[in-house]
Amino acid sequence: MTDKSLILLGGGGHATVLWEVLSLTECDVLGFVDPRPREDSVLALHARYLGDDGTVLLHDPQRVALINGIGSTASTQARRAIYQRFTAQGYEFAELVHPGALVSRLDTLFGMGVQVLAGAVIGPAVRFGDNVLINSRALVEHDCEVGAHCHVASGAVLCGGVRLGQGVHVGAGATIIQGVTVGDGAIIAAGSAVIKDVPATTLVAGVPARIKRTLDR
Ligand SMILES: CC(=O)SCCNC(=O)CCNC(=O)[C@H](O)C(C)(C)COP(=O)(O)OP(=O)(O)OC[C@H]1O[C@@H](n2cnc3c(N)ncnc32)[C@H](O)[C@@H]1OP(=O)(O)O
């Protein structure tokens, strides 16, 4: 974890989860930014509202680091966009690991700003790119490679040696069997069982998962 003070980007559901994780750490959290904060959002947890996203730029990137509070339910584009916007301005994103996650540090590599939430299990020799989100109770087995900006949603399972390209969304409760490769920008529907490689920018769904359509990106 960084020594810098932290600013949370976003105030919605994912930010609320992160706010709780932050409350379990010793970090100095300045507050959150959001263009349109809602009363039933992280505000309800008495988080300090700093202003819209542009407020971040009032803070020296040498002194503050950011937490990506944008979630995703399918496309990971919004999480990627805000990450790229602020890294281009010289800001760093802090790693955030819930104390109730089990993370092997045996040859496991984290990119910048990786988030691992409650109950997630990460096996040895796993490689995470930047801005990866491993959501609650997900399982990432040994030797997996998870590209930048991927979201492995709640309860999803990556068996050993799975390779995800960049910006892949693995839906809640989906399982990808060992050795499968998933191309950049693919979306795996919730609850699917993926038993063979998935081409880039396709949506796959079902048990076993089949291609439903090509995504427009
Ligand atoms: C903490 C958190 O909450 S993290 C967020 C976790 N949430 C998720 O991971 C949600 C993942 N989202 C899904 O699974 C959605 O159903 C999506 C993204 C796949 C739907 O995508 P859309 O583009 O809206 O697809 P649409 O609903 O039109 O369905 C396309 C086809 O896939 C099928 N399909 C969609 N979802 C599923 C699914 N989960 N399982 C099986 N088939 C599915 C549809 O029946 C349809 O099939 P058809 O073309 O044969 O009729």
Image: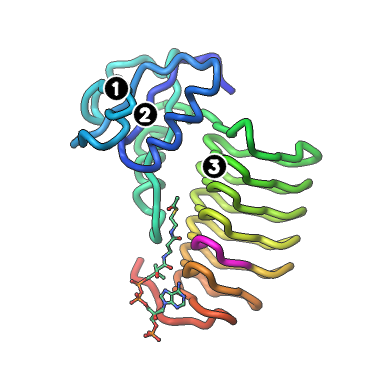
Number of the label disc, if any, that sits on residue 130: 3
Q: Which amino acid does label 2 sit on?
A: Gln
At a point 53% along the width and 23% down the height, the residue shown is 24
Query: How packed is label 2: few (under 14 Cα within 10 Å), some, or many (20 or more)?
Result: few
Rendered position, 61 above or below 177? above
Q: Main secondary structure of the magenta part?
A: loop
Percent from the top left, x then y, of residue 134?
Answer: 56, 47
Q: Is residue 8 a member of the stretch shown in magenta?
A: no
Q: In which quarter of the image is ligand 1?
A: bottom left
Mark earlier in primary sequence (1, 3): 1
Mark earlier in primary sequence (3, 2): 2
Query: How packed is label 3: few (under 14 Cα within 10 Å), some, or many (20 or more)?
Result: many
Residue on which the image places disc 2: 89
Percent from the top left, x then y, of residue 178?
Answer: 73, 67
Q: Give the structural element (helix, strand or loop) at label 1.
A: helix
Q: Give the structural element (helix, strand or loop) at label 2.
A: loop
Q: Does the residue labelled 2 lie within 8 Å of ligand 1?
A: no
In magenta, the rendered stretch is: 170-175
Circles 1 and 2: CB atoms closer than 8 Å: yes
